Amino acid sequence: MDTGDTAWVLTSAALVLLMTPGLAFFYGGMVRSKSVLNMMMMSLGAMAVVGVLWVLFGYSTAFGADVGAGLLGKPFEFFGLDGLLGADSLSGKIPSTVFVAFQAMFAIITVALISGAIADRARFGPWLLFAGLWATIVYFPVAHWVFDFDGKDEAGNVVDPGGWIANKLLAIDFAGGTAVHINAGAAGLALALVLGKRVGWPKEPMKPHSLPLVVLGAGLLWFGWFGFNAGSALGANGIAGVTFINTLVATCAAVLGWLLTERIRDGKATTLGAASGVVAGLVAITPACSAVTPVGAIAIGAITGALCALAVSLKYRFGFDDSLDVVGVHLVGGLSGTILIGLFASEAAPAKINGLFYGGGVDQLWRQAVGAFAVLAYSFVLSLALGYLVKFTVGFRATEEAEVASIDEAEHAERAYEYGSLTSARGTGKPSAAAGATAVLEGSNKK
């Protein structure tokens, strides 16, 4: 066991866990004030459900002994982490339990990401049911495909086969462009179709109620993402350093790409655009951070920032209500970052692969495309089926009355903002001007 590597991965796991509350702020700020708590609770609920399932059988399904051509691990091999708790149980140079904890955070945030596509209209209980089913049937197997590498003996012989994307297709996905972002984006598209459009969409304006919360959430996501990407090196080493720098510069370039696109298209660069550009850049560099140089990372970030800025309008053209642009940012950003590896990969980077622009031909490009679209198709089809299963058994969507009045009160008996009665400073008992303004604001929120 290497104590330095262990400390870094434990720290990275904590950083990645922070991303889910960060996502709750990001999504919560983007919705209207009457549904902010429901939005945040969907992220917190995903943490609770997936955390339990991961320990019981999720880790085994993703990283247990392969039971069929790289498609699935043994679901109950490490049930409840049985056999992994001893001090001599290692995953590389770190304790197995540390690796379990790190990967648990990936499973949690992947499920939470989906919720943005159905903001303002989903019931909380059915969402938890869907989250558990989706993690079990979709995420855990896909994590096996992408993250479970072949175990080999000292002679290089495979003694513990892993997932097909990582070991047979040989597609590069360092930290989850396919397993996390394409996976969640495809599921978000499926659920947006299952639940249908929000009441009043797209005719009524549904602007973010708190851009400061959005920026706070984006900042927490960026902070935690260094654990997400650099932590995936599974050691305090040079690979972590390269992925850390690439995560920084790709995100910066994506913000610029998004804002420039907004400026050309709309005449203004917006705060929401900057925050969204942060997330788009982080999504794009996630699969590519070990395969490209910093210059390649800048190119991937800038291209993806512009693409995602354009892609968020697709929902208006095709008529699907992806409330918080999970499709436009995570699906499109994940596809962009994964496929662009085939163009910008450089053998100077830790992955030691050349893409098309570095003399490597199209060999890596087709591998990236096959991996990306295989996950997209698998996730979309099964997410659609699971969404309809929940819809037709327990009911998925909130009533129109609850959606219009306040889904927070209908589902949680709470409101994010309570405005107490204000009286004049002289104690006359007459409402002050501030109280009048508050009453107007409350009325507008109810509408």
Image (spheres, grey):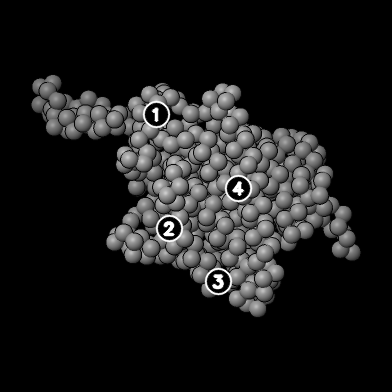
The residue mark sitting in front, 2 or 4, is 2
What residue sits right under mark 1 in the picture?
A: 403
Disc number placed over residue 183 in the picture, else none:
4
Element at badge 1? helix
Q: In this rendered view, identify the residue nearer to me: 375 or 11.
A: 375
First in sequence: mark 1 vs mark 2: 2
Q: Amino acid at mark 1?
A: Glu
Element at badge 4? helix
Q: Is residue 44 visible?
A: no
What residue sits right under mark 2 in the picture?
A: 310
Element at badge 3? helix
Q: Amino acid at mark 4?
A: Asn
User: Gap between marks 1 and 2, in whole Å?
Assistant: 29 Å
What residue sits right under mark 3 in the picture?
A: 296
Task: Report crowding for label 1: few under 14, some 14 to 19, many 20 or more residues within 10 A (C-alpha).
Answer: many
User: Gap between marks 2 and 4, in whole Å?
Assistant: 21 Å
